[in-house]
Image (cartoon, rainbow, N blue to C red):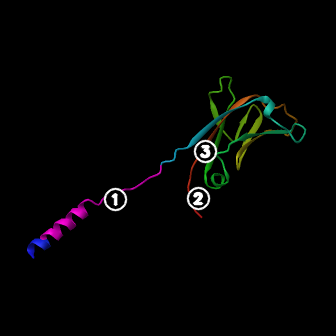
Amino acid sequence: MKKLILLLLCTATLGLVSCKKDTIVNNILPRTISYDIPTSAWKTSDGGRSYFTEVNVPENNDDFNQSGGVIVSMAFDANKSIFDGLPNVYQGLSYQFSSEPNYVVIYVDGIDGQVISPPSAARVKIVLVDSELID
């Protein structure tokens, strides 16, 4: 009888020692999309007082657009290597953006409401940051 109880205790001890709690963490890194905007991509709908362009971002689907974060910056320098976050004012033009499913729309307005020339070519950097929506 003692051998049976000892055998059961040894089996239970080995079973408990071999249990291990694993914590699984999903590390989803932010994604960055770089896109060159040519001067010809800017469109106006008010006679040249403001311009906009749409950047196709299929990763910004309906779900991500509701729960994720979108950060946009633009490089205006000749080398397109110095990025300024939006919203921003550069050379008398105000730059903003909006996030829509599958798109990021960039808007440019003259700060004085006058007719402006289309913005020059620029490079845009869009960073998508995953997040969990808490309702």
Q: Is residue 10 left or right of residue 129?
A: left
**Going 21% across and 62% down the picture, which residue do you hit?**
14
Question: CA–CA distance between discs 1 and 3?
Answer: 32 Å
Sequence-wise first label, 2 or 1 = 1
Q: Nearer the viewer, mark 1 or mark 3?
A: 1
Of the numbered discs in the image, which one, if any, rests on residue 129? none
Q: Amino acid at mark 3?
A: Leu
The N terminus: image quadrant: bottom left
The stretch in magenta equals 6-26
Sequence-wise first label, 1 or 3 = 1
Which residue position holds label 2? 133
Residue 128 vs 84, above or below: the answer is: below
Residue furthest toward the bottom? 1
Sequence-wise first label, 2 or 3 = 3
Which residue position holds label 3? 128
The C terminus: image quadrant: bottom right
Element type where label 1 sits in the image: loop
Q: Amino acid at mark 1?
A: Lys
Q: Position of residue 107 (x, y in %)?
A: 77, 41
Residue 29 vs 9, above or below: the answer is: above
Q: Nearer the viewer, residue 91 or 75?
A: 75
Question: CA–CA distance between discs 2 and 1?
Answer: 27 Å
Q: Position of residue 4 (x, y in %)?
A: 13, 73
The question of residue 22 being in magenta is answered with yes
Q: Is disc 2 in contact with disc 3, using a CB cutoff of under 8 Å?
A: no
Which residue position holds label 1? 21
